[in-house]
Amino acid sequence: MRPLTVRKSTDSSPATHHTARPGTRTAATLAVSALLISSWWTSPAGPAHASEVRPAAGSSPASPADAELRGIDLNTVTIPQLQARMASGALTPSGLTRAYLKRIKAIDPKIHSVLRTDPTALQQAARSDARHRRGAALGPLDGIPVLIKDNVDTKGLLSTAGSLALATAAPQRDAGLVTRLREAGAVILGKTNLSEWANFRAAKPTSGWSAVGGQTHNPYVLDRNPCGSSAGSGAALAASLAQVAIGTETDGSIVCPAGMNGVVGLKPTLGVVSGRGVVPISAEQDTAGPMARNVVDVALTLAALREKRDKAYVTGEGAARASGTTADGSAQASMRGRRIGLWRLPSLGKDVDKVMTTAAQRLRSAGATVVEVTPPYQDRLAELEFPALLSEFHRDINAYLAGRRGPRNLAELTAFHRGTPAEQTCFAGVELFESALTAPPTTDPQYRAARAELTRLARKSIDDTMAAHRLDAIATPTNPPAWTTDCARGDNDVIPSSTPAAVAGYPSLSVPAGSVGELPVGLLLMSGKHKDEALLSLGAQVEQRLRAWRAPRYLPTLPTPTASEELRGTGR
Protein backbone atom coordinates (compact mmCIF):
# COMPACT_ATOMS: atom_id res chain seq x y z
CA MET A 1 0.00 0.00 0.00
CA ARG A 2 1.07 3.55 -0.45
CA PRO A 3 -0.38 7.01 0.22
CA LEU A 4 -0.99 9.56 -2.50
CA THR A 5 2.50 9.23 -3.95
CA VAL A 6 4.14 5.98 -5.03
CA ARG A 7 5.02 3.71 -2.15
CA LYS A 8 5.22 -0.04 -1.77
CA SER A 9 4.74 -2.79 0.78
CA THR A 10 5.02 -6.64 1.80
CA ASP A 11 7.00 -9.44 3.04
CA SER A 12 9.75 -11.41 4.87
CA SER A 13 12.40 -10.46 7.44
CA PRO A 14 16.14 -10.19 7.93
CA ALA A 15 17.97 -13.36 7.06
CA THR A 16 19.48 -13.76 10.50
CA HIS A 17 18.91 -17.17 12.06
CA HIS A 18 19.40 -18.09 15.69
CA THR A 19 19.25 -21.55 17.21
CA ALA A 20 17.35 -22.36 20.37
CA ARG A 21 16.15 -25.45 22.17
CA PRO A 22 12.76 -26.56 20.77
CA GLY A 23 9.81 -25.59 22.93
CA THR A 24 11.34 -22.56 24.64
CA ARG A 25 9.47 -19.24 24.81
CA THR A 26 10.24 -15.78 26.11
CA ALA A 27 8.82 -15.03 29.54
CA ALA A 28 7.53 -11.67 28.35
CA THR A 29 5.54 -13.15 25.48
CA LEU A 30 4.12 -15.92 27.63
CA ALA A 31 3.19 -13.42 30.30
CA VAL A 32 1.12 -11.56 27.74
CA SER A 33 -0.29 -14.83 26.41
CA ALA A 34 -1.32 -15.93 29.89
CA LEU A 35 -2.85 -12.52 30.54
CA LEU A 36 -4.85 -12.76 27.31
CA ILE A 37 -5.95 -16.33 28.03
CA SER A 38 -7.22 -15.34 31.44
CA SER A 39 -8.94 -12.23 30.10
CA TRP A 40 -10.64 -14.18 27.28
CA TRP A 41 -12.20 -16.72 29.61
CA THR A 42 -13.81 -14.01 31.74
CA SER A 43 -14.67 -11.64 28.89
CA PRO A 44 -18.06 -11.25 27.21
CA ALA A 45 -16.15 -11.28 23.93
CA GLY A 46 -15.63 -15.03 24.22
CA PRO A 47 -17.51 -18.07 25.54
CA ALA A 48 -17.30 -18.68 29.27
CA HIS A 49 -16.90 -22.42 28.77
CA ALA A 50 -15.75 -24.52 25.84
CA SER A 51 -18.90 -26.63 26.14
CA GLU A 52 -20.99 -23.61 25.17
CA VAL A 53 -19.53 -23.12 21.72
CA ARG A 54 -21.56 -24.16 18.68
CA PRO A 55 -20.96 -25.60 15.18
CA ALA A 56 -19.31 -23.14 12.80
CA ALA A 57 -21.50 -21.19 10.42
CA GLY A 58 -21.31 -22.65 6.94
CA SER A 59 -20.31 -26.13 8.10
CA SER A 60 -22.30 -29.23 7.19
CA PRO A 61 -24.30 -31.18 9.80
CA ALA A 62 -22.19 -33.26 12.15
CA SER A 63 -21.69 -36.95 11.31
CA PRO A 64 -20.60 -39.70 13.74
CA ALA A 65 -17.03 -39.08 12.62
CA ASP A 66 -17.39 -35.46 13.78
CA ALA A 67 -18.48 -36.37 17.30
CA GLU A 68 -15.47 -34.87 19.04
CA LEU A 69 -16.06 -31.53 17.27
CA ARG A 70 -19.63 -31.23 18.59
CA GLY A 71 -20.00 -28.15 20.72
CA ILE A 72 -17.00 -26.39 19.13
CA ASP A 73 -17.59 -23.27 17.05
CA LEU A 74 -14.53 -22.97 14.86
CA ASN A 75 -15.41 -19.32 14.24
CA THR A 76 -14.87 -18.32 17.87
CA VAL A 77 -12.92 -21.04 19.67
CA THR A 78 -9.46 -20.06 20.93
CA ILE A 79 -6.26 -22.06 21.25
CA PRO A 80 -6.55 -22.19 25.08
CA GLN A 81 -10.07 -23.61 24.77
CA LEU A 82 -8.90 -26.20 22.25
CA GLN A 83 -5.94 -27.20 24.41
CA ALA A 84 -8.24 -27.59 27.43
CA ARG A 85 -10.37 -30.04 25.47
CA MET A 86 -7.28 -31.86 24.21
CA ALA A 87 -5.96 -32.16 27.75
CA SER A 88 -9.26 -33.66 28.90
CA GLY A 89 -9.32 -36.15 26.02
CA ALA A 90 -12.52 -34.68 24.56
CA LEU A 91 -10.70 -33.52 21.41
CA THR A 92 -7.71 -34.78 19.45
CA PRO A 93 -5.44 -32.86 17.09
CA SER A 94 -6.45 -35.34 14.38
CA GLY A 95 -10.11 -34.54 14.87
CA LEU A 96 -9.40 -30.82 14.73
CA THR A 97 -7.25 -31.18 11.61
CA ARG A 98 -9.93 -33.25 9.84
CA ALA A 99 -12.50 -30.58 10.67
CA TYR A 100 -10.41 -27.83 9.09
CA LEU A 101 -9.60 -29.95 6.03
CA LYS A 102 -13.32 -30.60 5.63
CA ARG A 103 -14.07 -26.87 5.80
CA ILE A 104 -11.38 -26.12 3.22
CA LYS A 105 -12.96 -28.62 0.85
CA ALA A 106 -16.48 -27.26 1.43
CA ILE A 107 -15.90 -23.51 1.62
CA ASP A 108 -12.66 -22.59 -0.14
CA PRO A 109 -14.11 -23.05 -3.67
CA LYS A 110 -16.03 -19.84 -2.92
CA ILE A 111 -13.00 -17.75 -1.95
CA HIS A 112 -9.87 -19.44 -3.41
CA SER A 113 -7.67 -18.73 -0.40
CA VAL A 114 -5.86 -22.08 -0.02
CA LEU A 115 -3.50 -23.12 -2.82
CA ARG A 116 -2.74 -26.59 -1.51
CA THR A 117 -3.08 -28.66 1.63
CA ASP A 118 -0.18 -30.60 3.09
CA PRO A 119 -0.63 -34.34 2.39
CA THR A 120 1.18 -35.05 5.68
CA ALA A 121 -1.19 -32.94 7.81
CA LEU A 122 -2.99 -35.91 9.34
CA GLN A 123 0.33 -37.66 10.02
CA GLN A 124 1.54 -34.53 11.83
CA ALA A 125 -1.71 -34.48 13.81
CA ALA A 126 -1.36 -38.17 14.72
CA ARG A 127 2.07 -37.49 16.23
CA SER A 128 0.50 -34.68 18.24
CA ASP A 129 -2.26 -37.08 19.36
CA ALA A 130 0.41 -39.35 20.81
CA ARG A 131 2.12 -36.49 22.65
CA HIS A 132 -1.17 -35.38 24.18
CA ARG A 133 -1.97 -38.94 25.30
CA ARG A 134 1.41 -39.11 27.06
CA GLY A 135 0.89 -35.72 28.68
CA ALA A 136 3.92 -34.48 26.74
CA ALA A 137 2.44 -31.69 24.61
CA LEU A 138 5.13 -29.29 23.40
CA GLY A 139 3.17 -26.14 24.22
CA PRO A 140 0.06 -24.19 23.28
CA LEU A 141 0.49 -24.71 19.52
CA ASP A 142 0.87 -28.49 19.72
CA GLY A 143 -1.79 -29.95 17.42
CA ILE A 144 -3.04 -26.56 16.20
CA PRO A 145 -3.56 -26.34 12.39
CA VAL A 146 -1.71 -23.45 10.71
CA LEU A 147 -1.86 -22.16 7.14
CA ILE A 148 1.28 -20.52 5.70
CA LYS A 149 1.53 -17.86 3.02
CA ASP A 150 3.01 -19.22 -0.19
CA ASN A 151 6.08 -16.99 -0.14
CA VAL A 152 7.41 -18.90 2.88
CA ASP A 153 9.59 -21.92 2.06
CA THR A 154 8.01 -25.14 3.29
CA LYS A 155 9.96 -28.35 2.69
CA GLY A 156 8.12 -30.75 0.41
CA LEU A 157 5.40 -28.22 -0.53
CA LEU A 158 5.52 -25.87 -3.50
CA SER A 159 6.34 -22.37 -2.26
CA THR A 160 5.84 -20.09 -5.22
CA ALA A 161 5.20 -16.45 -4.20
CA GLY A 162 2.23 -16.95 -6.53
CA SER A 163 4.47 -17.13 -9.60
CA LEU A 164 4.80 -19.94 -12.12
CA ALA A 165 8.53 -19.19 -12.12
CA LEU A 166 8.86 -21.00 -8.76
CA ALA A 167 6.22 -23.67 -9.39
CA THR A 168 8.49 -26.40 -10.75
CA ALA A 169 10.05 -27.69 -7.52
CA ALA A 170 9.46 -27.49 -3.77
CA PRO A 171 12.13 -26.02 -1.47
CA GLN A 172 14.55 -28.49 0.06
CA ARG A 173 14.52 -26.75 3.43
CA ASP A 174 11.95 -25.16 5.71
CA ALA A 175 12.04 -21.43 6.33
CA GLY A 176 13.21 -20.55 9.83
CA LEU A 177 9.70 -19.72 10.99
CA VAL A 178 8.34 -23.05 9.70
CA THR A 179 11.03 -24.82 11.73
CA ARG A 180 9.81 -22.92 14.79
CA LEU A 181 6.21 -23.96 14.15
CA ARG A 182 7.20 -27.61 13.77
CA GLU A 183 9.23 -27.43 16.98
CA ALA A 184 6.11 -26.12 18.72
CA GLY A 185 4.07 -29.09 17.45
CA ALA A 186 1.86 -27.09 15.08
CA VAL A 187 0.18 -28.93 12.20
CA ILE A 188 1.20 -27.38 8.87
CA LEU A 189 -2.16 -27.53 7.14
CA GLY A 190 -1.21 -26.00 3.77
CA LYS A 191 -0.29 -22.87 1.81
CA THR A 192 -2.34 -19.75 1.12
CA ASN A 193 -2.66 -17.64 -2.00
CA LEU A 194 -1.19 -14.13 -2.08
CA SER A 195 -0.76 -11.12 -4.28
CA GLU A 196 1.88 -12.37 -6.69
CA TRP A 197 5.41 -11.41 -5.64
CA ALA A 198 3.76 -9.72 -2.66
CA ASN A 199 2.45 -6.91 -4.89
CA PHE A 200 5.97 -5.98 -6.00
CA ARG A 201 5.76 -6.75 -9.70
CA ALA A 202 3.40 -4.42 -11.58
CA ALA A 203 2.64 -0.73 -11.26
CA LYS A 204 -1.11 -1.47 -11.13
CA PRO A 205 -1.54 -4.92 -9.56
CA THR A 206 -4.74 -6.51 -8.33
CA SER A 207 -4.44 -7.57 -4.69
CA GLY A 208 -5.08 -11.24 -4.01
CA TRP A 209 -4.32 -12.38 -7.58
CA SER A 210 -1.54 -14.73 -8.57
CA ALA A 211 -0.89 -16.81 -11.66
CA VAL A 212 -0.66 -19.90 -9.45
CA GLY A 213 -3.86 -19.38 -7.46
CA GLY A 214 -6.04 -16.96 -9.40
CA GLN A 215 -8.08 -14.40 -7.48
CA THR A 216 -8.81 -14.70 -3.76
CA HIS A 217 -12.20 -13.26 -2.78
CA ASN A 218 -13.28 -11.46 0.38
CA PRO A 219 -15.54 -13.84 2.37
CA TYR A 220 -17.80 -11.01 3.49
CA VAL A 221 -18.73 -9.97 -0.05
CA LEU A 222 -17.29 -12.16 -2.76
CA ASP A 223 -16.80 -9.52 -5.45
CA ARG A 224 -14.78 -7.40 -2.99
CA ASN A 225 -11.03 -7.50 -2.54
CA PRO A 226 -9.28 -9.18 0.42
CA CYS A 227 -6.36 -6.68 0.29
CA GLY A 228 -2.82 -7.92 0.00
CA SER A 229 -0.41 -9.26 -0.10
CA SER A 230 -1.36 -11.81 2.61
CA ALA A 231 -4.76 -12.08 0.96
CA GLY A 232 -5.20 -15.82 1.27
CA SER A 233 -4.16 -15.89 4.91
CA GLY A 234 -6.68 -13.18 5.83
CA ALA A 235 -9.54 -14.65 3.80
CA ALA A 236 -8.91 -18.19 5.04
CA LEU A 237 -9.07 -17.04 8.65
CA ALA A 238 -12.28 -15.09 8.04
CA ALA A 239 -13.77 -18.30 6.63
CA SER A 240 -12.44 -20.35 9.59
CA LEU A 241 -10.29 -22.63 7.42
CA ALA A 242 -7.48 -22.80 10.03
CA GLN A 243 -6.91 -21.71 13.61
CA VAL A 244 -3.88 -19.57 12.74
CA ALA A 245 -2.22 -18.31 9.56
CA ILE A 246 1.14 -16.78 8.78
CA GLY A 247 1.39 -13.58 6.76
CA THR A 248 4.34 -11.44 5.71
CA GLU A 249 4.72 -7.68 5.40
CA THR A 250 7.02 -5.02 4.08
CA ASP A 251 4.37 -2.29 4.42
CA GLY A 252 0.74 -3.21 5.00
CA SER A 253 0.64 -6.83 3.84
CA ILE A 254 -0.33 -8.36 7.19
CA VAL A 255 -2.40 -5.60 8.70
CA CYS A 256 -4.47 -4.59 5.64
CA PRO A 257 -5.70 -8.15 4.89
CA ALA A 258 -6.40 -8.56 8.62
CA GLY A 259 -8.49 -5.39 8.66
CA MET A 260 -10.24 -6.06 5.35
CA ASN A 261 -11.18 -9.63 6.37
CA GLY A 262 -12.20 -8.81 9.94
CA VAL A 263 -9.43 -10.72 11.74
CA VAL A 264 -6.35 -9.91 13.87
CA GLY A 265 -2.86 -9.50 12.43
CA LEU A 266 0.46 -8.60 14.04
CA LYS A 267 3.44 -7.17 12.20
CA PRO A 268 6.18 -7.80 14.79
CA THR A 269 9.23 -5.70 15.50
CA LEU A 270 11.76 -6.23 12.70
CA GLY A 271 14.01 -9.19 13.50
CA VAL A 272 11.75 -10.89 16.04
CA VAL A 273 10.78 -13.55 13.47
CA SER A 274 13.38 -15.12 11.17
CA GLY A 275 13.30 -14.08 7.53
CA ARG A 276 15.41 -16.99 6.31
CA GLY A 277 13.55 -18.81 3.56
CA VAL A 278 10.96 -16.08 2.96
CA VAL A 279 10.76 -14.54 -0.51
CA PRO A 280 12.05 -11.02 0.11
CA ILE A 281 11.44 -7.45 -0.89
CA SER A 282 13.62 -5.66 1.65
CA ALA A 283 15.61 -6.96 4.59
CA GLU A 284 15.29 -3.44 6.02
CA GLN A 285 11.50 -3.84 6.43
CA ASP A 286 10.36 -7.42 5.74
CA THR A 287 8.88 -9.54 8.51
CA ALA A 288 6.55 -12.48 8.86
CA GLY A 289 3.88 -12.42 11.54
CA PRO A 290 0.89 -14.27 12.99
CA MET A 291 -2.76 -13.79 12.02
CA ALA A 292 -5.80 -15.26 13.78
CA ARG A 293 -9.42 -14.52 14.69
CA ASN A 294 -8.49 -13.25 18.16
CA VAL A 295 -5.56 -11.60 19.93
CA VAL A 296 -4.79 -14.49 22.29
CA ASP A 297 -4.09 -16.85 19.38
CA VAL A 298 -1.84 -14.24 17.76
CA ALA A 299 0.11 -13.83 21.02
CA LEU A 300 0.59 -17.57 21.47
CA THR A 301 1.75 -17.95 17.88
CA LEU A 302 4.24 -15.12 18.25
CA ALA A 303 5.69 -16.96 21.26
CA ALA A 304 6.34 -19.96 19.02
CA LEU A 305 7.76 -17.93 16.14
CA ARG A 306 10.27 -15.87 18.12
CA GLU A 307 13.94 -16.40 17.29
CA LYS A 308 15.44 -15.18 20.57
CA ARG A 309 14.07 -17.06 23.54
CA ASP A 310 14.84 -17.80 27.17
CA LYS A 311 17.16 -20.76 27.79
CA ALA A 312 14.68 -22.33 30.24
CA TYR A 313 11.15 -23.27 29.24
CA VAL A 314 8.67 -20.92 30.92
CA THR A 315 5.02 -21.93 31.17
CA GLY A 316 2.29 -19.42 30.56
CA GLU A 317 1.08 -19.92 34.12
CA GLY A 318 4.50 -19.24 35.57
CA ALA A 319 4.93 -16.16 33.45
CA ALA A 320 1.55 -14.90 34.58
CA ARG A 321 2.59 -15.26 38.23
CA ALA A 322 5.88 -13.49 37.51
CA SER A 323 4.08 -10.56 35.93
CA GLY A 324 1.50 -10.28 38.71
CA THR A 325 -1.44 -11.35 36.57
CA THR A 326 -4.55 -12.05 38.66
CA ALA A 327 -6.29 -15.39 38.32
CA ASP A 328 -9.28 -13.91 36.47
CA GLY A 329 -7.34 -11.32 34.48
CA SER A 330 -9.44 -8.48 35.93
CA ALA A 331 -6.51 -6.21 36.73
CA GLN A 332 -5.28 -6.33 33.16
CA ALA A 333 -8.78 -5.87 31.73
CA SER A 334 -9.08 -2.33 33.10
CA MET A 335 -8.20 0.44 30.67
CA ARG A 336 -7.82 3.12 33.32
CA GLY A 337 -4.52 4.89 32.82
CA ARG A 338 -4.23 3.80 29.19
CA ARG A 339 -3.46 6.64 26.78
CA ILE A 340 -4.14 6.19 23.08
CA GLY A 341 -3.42 8.67 20.30
CA LEU A 342 -6.10 8.60 17.58
CA TRP A 343 -4.68 9.40 14.13
CA ARG A 344 -7.67 10.06 11.91
CA LEU A 345 -7.29 9.58 8.17
CA PRO A 346 -9.98 11.62 6.38
CA SER A 347 -8.71 10.30 3.04
CA LEU A 348 -10.31 6.94 3.88
CA GLY A 349 -13.78 8.48 3.92
CA LYS A 350 -16.53 9.54 6.32
CA ASP A 351 -17.76 5.98 6.87
CA VAL A 352 -14.38 4.87 8.20
CA ASP A 353 -14.09 8.00 10.32
CA LYS A 354 -17.44 7.17 11.96
CA VAL A 355 -16.08 3.73 12.88
CA MET A 356 -13.05 5.42 14.48
CA THR A 357 -15.28 7.86 16.41
CA THR A 358 -17.38 5.00 17.78
CA ALA A 359 -14.27 3.03 18.74
CA ALA A 360 -12.79 6.04 20.54
CA GLN A 361 -16.04 6.55 22.47
CA ARG A 362 -16.07 2.93 23.62
CA LEU A 363 -12.45 3.05 24.74
CA ARG A 364 -13.09 6.25 26.67
CA SER A 365 -16.11 4.60 28.32
CA ALA A 366 -13.77 1.79 29.42
CA GLY A 367 -11.51 4.30 31.18
CA ALA A 368 -8.90 5.01 28.50
CA THR A 369 -7.78 8.50 27.56
CA VAL A 370 -7.97 9.06 23.80
CA VAL A 371 -6.34 12.14 22.30
CA GLU A 372 -6.13 13.10 18.64
CA VAL A 373 -2.67 13.13 17.05
CA THR A 374 -1.02 13.54 13.65
CA PRO A 375 2.39 11.84 13.40
CA PRO A 376 4.83 14.06 11.47
CA TYR A 377 6.97 13.41 8.39
CA GLN A 378 4.38 11.31 6.49
CA ASP A 379 4.89 13.06 3.15
CA ARG A 380 8.65 12.62 3.37
CA LEU A 381 8.26 8.91 4.23
CA ALA A 382 6.08 8.43 1.16
CA GLU A 383 8.68 10.20 -0.98
CA LEU A 384 11.64 8.13 0.25
CA GLU A 385 10.27 4.63 0.77
CA PHE A 386 9.64 3.31 -2.73
CA PRO A 387 13.06 4.20 -4.23
CA ALA A 388 14.77 2.51 -1.29
CA LEU A 389 12.66 -0.63 -1.70
CA LEU A 390 13.60 -0.90 -5.38
CA SER A 391 17.32 -1.03 -4.57
CA GLU A 392 16.78 -3.48 -1.72
CA PHE A 393 14.53 -5.75 -3.78
CA HIS A 394 17.15 -6.12 -6.52
CA ARG A 395 19.77 -7.11 -3.93
CA ASP A 396 17.56 -9.42 -1.87
CA ILE A 397 15.61 -11.20 -4.61
CA ASN A 398 18.87 -12.04 -6.41
CA ALA A 399 20.19 -13.63 -3.22
CA TYR A 400 16.98 -15.63 -2.74
CA LEU A 401 16.64 -16.84 -6.33
CA ALA A 402 20.22 -18.09 -6.33
CA GLY A 403 19.08 -20.85 -3.96
CA ARG A 404 15.91 -21.89 -5.80
CA ARG A 405 15.29 -23.84 -9.00
CA GLY A 406 14.06 -21.54 -11.79
CA PRO A 407 15.17 -18.01 -12.71
CA ARG A 408 18.48 -17.31 -10.99
CA ASN A 409 18.23 -13.53 -10.73
CA LEU A 410 15.87 -10.62 -11.27
CA ALA A 411 16.82 -10.16 -14.93
CA GLU A 412 15.90 -13.80 -15.69
CA LEU A 413 12.73 -13.48 -13.62
CA THR A 414 11.66 -10.39 -15.57
CA ALA A 415 12.24 -12.19 -18.86
CA PHE A 416 10.21 -15.16 -17.63
CA HIS A 417 7.20 -12.98 -16.83
CA ARG A 418 7.41 -11.07 -20.09
CA GLY A 419 7.41 -14.35 -22.04
CA THR A 420 4.79 -16.33 -20.11
CA PRO A 421 1.18 -15.63 -21.19
CA ALA A 422 -0.27 -17.37 -18.12
CA GLU A 423 1.41 -14.70 -16.01
CA GLN A 424 -0.51 -11.98 -17.83
CA THR A 425 -4.15 -13.07 -17.49
CA CYS A 426 -5.04 -10.41 -14.88
CA PHE A 427 -2.32 -7.83 -15.48
CA ALA A 428 0.73 -7.97 -17.68
CA GLY A 429 3.04 -5.39 -16.20
CA VAL A 430 6.48 -5.97 -14.70
CA GLU A 431 7.23 -2.29 -14.17
CA LEU A 432 8.54 -2.70 -10.63
CA PHE A 433 10.90 -5.48 -11.71
CA GLU A 434 12.17 -3.21 -14.48
CA SER A 435 12.60 -0.25 -12.13
CA ALA A 436 14.47 -2.39 -9.62
CA LEU A 437 16.88 -3.57 -12.31
CA THR A 438 17.95 0.02 -12.95
CA ALA A 439 17.82 1.24 -9.34
CA PRO A 440 21.05 2.32 -7.62
CA PRO A 441 22.81 -0.49 -5.76
CA THR A 442 22.58 -0.58 -1.97
CA THR A 443 26.27 0.42 -1.87
CA ASP A 444 25.40 3.78 -3.46
CA PRO A 445 26.00 6.70 -1.02
CA GLN A 446 22.79 8.48 -2.04
CA TYR A 447 20.75 5.32 -1.44
CA ARG A 448 22.38 4.87 1.97
CA ALA A 449 21.67 8.45 2.97
CA ALA A 450 18.04 8.17 1.84
CA ARG A 451 17.49 4.90 3.73
CA ALA A 452 19.06 6.34 6.88
CA GLU A 453 16.80 9.39 6.68
CA LEU A 454 13.77 7.22 5.96
CA THR A 455 14.30 4.98 8.99
CA ARG A 456 15.16 7.89 11.27
CA LEU A 457 12.06 9.89 10.35
CA ALA A 458 9.75 6.88 10.61
CA ARG A 459 10.99 6.18 14.12
CA LYS A 460 10.73 9.84 15.11
CA SER A 461 7.18 10.02 13.77
CA ILE A 462 6.14 7.35 16.28
CA ASP A 463 8.56 8.01 19.15
CA ASP A 464 8.05 11.78 19.23
CA THR A 465 4.26 11.49 19.00
CA MET A 466 4.11 8.93 21.79
CA ALA A 467 6.47 10.92 24.02
CA ALA A 468 4.68 14.24 23.48
CA HIS A 469 1.32 12.78 24.51
CA ARG A 470 2.57 10.07 26.93
CA LEU A 471 0.88 7.35 24.84
CA ASP A 472 0.69 3.60 25.15
CA ALA A 473 -0.02 3.38 21.41
CA ILE A 474 -1.11 5.27 18.33
CA ALA A 475 -4.42 4.08 16.83
CA THR A 476 -5.53 4.67 13.25
CA PRO A 477 -7.77 3.03 10.63
CA THR A 478 -6.20 -0.07 9.12
CA ASN A 479 -8.22 -0.02 5.90
CA PRO A 480 -11.13 1.41 3.95
CA PRO A 481 -14.12 -0.83 3.14
CA ALA A 482 -13.11 -3.47 0.63
CA TRP A 483 -13.23 -2.24 -2.96
CA THR A 484 -14.56 -4.30 -5.86
CA THR A 485 -11.94 -6.50 -7.48
CA ASP A 486 -11.20 -5.45 -11.06
CA CYS A 487 -8.16 -6.63 -13.03
CA ALA A 488 -8.57 -3.92 -15.63
CA ARG A 489 -8.61 -1.14 -13.06
CA GLY A 490 -6.19 -2.68 -10.56
CA ASP A 491 -5.48 -1.24 -7.13
CA ASN A 492 -4.94 2.41 -6.28
CA ASP A 493 -2.65 2.90 -3.27
CA VAL A 494 -4.13 5.35 -0.79
CA ILE A 495 -3.73 3.69 2.63
CA PRO A 496 -0.92 5.39 4.58
CA SER A 497 -1.56 4.01 8.07
CA SER A 498 0.84 1.07 7.96
CA THR A 499 3.88 3.02 6.79
CA PRO A 500 5.35 4.55 9.99
CA ALA A 501 5.65 1.23 11.85
CA ALA A 502 6.64 -0.69 8.71
CA VAL A 503 9.51 1.64 7.85
CA ALA A 504 10.58 2.08 11.48
CA GLY A 505 10.67 -1.68 12.07
CA TYR A 506 8.22 -1.21 14.96
CA PRO A 507 5.27 -3.49 15.79
CA SER A 508 1.73 -2.84 14.58
CA LEU A 509 -1.44 -4.78 15.37
CA SER A 510 -4.79 -4.67 13.56
CA VAL A 511 -7.93 -5.67 15.49
CA PRO A 512 -11.54 -5.53 14.24
CA ALA A 513 -13.04 -2.10 14.91
CA GLY A 514 -16.41 -2.24 13.17
CA SER A 515 -17.93 -2.35 9.73
CA VAL A 516 -19.17 -0.14 6.93
CA GLY A 517 -22.28 -2.08 6.04
CA GLU A 518 -21.10 -5.65 5.44
CA LEU A 519 -17.43 -4.71 5.10
CA PRO A 520 -15.01 -4.91 8.07
CA VAL A 521 -12.74 -2.07 9.14
CA GLY A 522 -9.72 -2.61 11.41
CA LEU A 523 -8.15 -0.44 14.10
CA LEU A 524 -4.37 -0.34 13.68
CA LEU A 525 -2.35 0.01 16.90
CA MET A 526 1.35 0.85 16.71
CA SER A 527 4.00 1.37 19.36
CA GLY A 528 7.77 1.52 19.87
CA LYS A 529 10.54 -0.95 19.15
CA HIS A 530 10.19 -4.31 20.94
CA LYS A 531 6.86 -3.25 22.46
CA ASP A 532 5.16 -6.26 20.86
CA GLU A 533 3.95 -7.76 24.13
CA ALA A 534 2.64 -4.47 25.47
CA LEU A 535 0.86 -3.89 22.16
CA LEU A 536 -0.75 -7.34 22.31
CA SER A 537 -1.90 -6.67 25.88
CA LEU A 538 -3.49 -3.39 24.83
CA GLY A 539 -4.90 -5.04 21.71
CA ALA A 540 -6.66 -7.66 23.82
CA GLN A 541 -8.28 -4.93 25.89
CA VAL A 542 -9.35 -3.05 22.77
CA GLU A 543 -10.71 -6.28 21.26
CA GLN A 544 -12.81 -6.94 24.38
CA ARG A 545 -14.20 -3.42 24.49
CA LEU A 546 -15.05 -3.13 20.79
CA ARG A 547 -16.30 -6.69 20.27
CA ALA A 548 -16.50 -5.96 16.55
CA TRP A 549 -15.89 -9.42 15.07
CA ARG A 550 -18.70 -11.15 13.21
CA ALA A 551 -18.81 -14.11 10.85
CA PRO A 552 -18.85 -13.53 7.07
CA ARG A 553 -21.98 -14.25 5.04
CA TYR A 554 -20.35 -14.90 1.64
CA LEU A 555 -22.65 -12.44 -0.13
CA PRO A 556 -22.09 -12.44 -3.90
CA THR A 557 -22.21 -8.64 -4.14
CA LEU A 558 -23.72 -5.52 -2.54
CA PRO A 559 -26.69 -3.72 -4.07
CA THR A 560 -25.10 -0.27 -3.83
CA PRO A 561 -21.50 0.94 -3.47
CA THR A 562 -20.28 2.26 -0.13
CA ALA A 563 -19.41 5.93 0.27
CA SER A 564 -15.75 4.88 0.27
CA GLU A 565 -16.05 2.65 -2.81
CA GLU A 566 -13.31 4.42 -4.78
CA LEU A 567 -10.70 4.03 -2.04
CA ARG A 568 -8.47 1.19 -3.07
CA GLY A 569 -5.11 -0.03 -1.85
CA THR A 570 -2.45 -2.70 -1.88
CA GLY A 571 0.01 -3.99 0.66
CA ARG A 572 3.42 -5.51 0.19
Image (cartoon, rainbow, N blue to C red):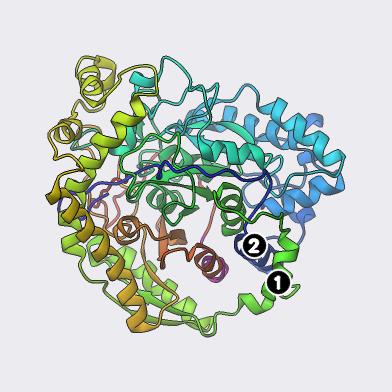
**Looking at the rendered structure, which numbered label has been put on residue 441?**
none
**Circle 1/circle 2 CB separation < 8 Å:** yes
Q: Is residue 543 magenta?
A: yes
User: Which residue occupies 30% across, 56% down?
Assistant: 503
Q: Is residue 530 visible?
A: yes
Q: Position of residue 491 (x, y in %)?
A: 24, 42
Q: Is residue 128 magenta?
A: no
Spot occupied by residue 541 in the image (x, y as percentages of width and height) = 56, 70
Q: Is label 1 in a helix, a strand or a loop?
A: helix
| Residue at image location 23% in from the left, 34% down from the top | 394
- Circle 2 packing at 10 Å, graded few (<14), some (14-19), many (20+), is many
Look at the picture and state if 170 lies above or below 266: above
> Circle 1 is placed at which residue position?
322
Q: Is residue 102 above or below residue 423?
A: below
To which residue does mark 2 refer? 27
Asked if residue 206 can be seen in this view, the reply is no
Label 1 and label 2: CA atoms lie apart by: 9 Å
Of the 4 image quadrants, the one containing the C terminus is top left
Toward the viewer: 473 or 91?
A: 473
Q: Position of residue 486 (x, y in %)?
A: 26, 36
Residue density around tag 1, few if under 14, some if 14–19, many if 20 or more, within 10 Å: few
Query: What type is the residue that disc 1 sits on?
Result: Ala
Amino acid type at image mark 2: Ala
Give residue 106's position: percent from left, percent from top.
Answer: 58, 29
Residue 83 relative to residue 492: left or right: right
Would you place residue 549 above or below residue 199 in this image? Answer: below
Residue that appears at 24% across and 65% down:
457
Query: Viewer-proximal residue, 35 or 388?
Result: 388
Find numbered disc 2 in the image and state the secondary structure of the residue it sits on: helix
Q: Which residues are magenta?
A: 539-548
Q: Look at 82% across and 34% down and name the residue there.
A: 130
Q: Which numbered disc flags the more N-terminal residue, 1 or 2? A: 2
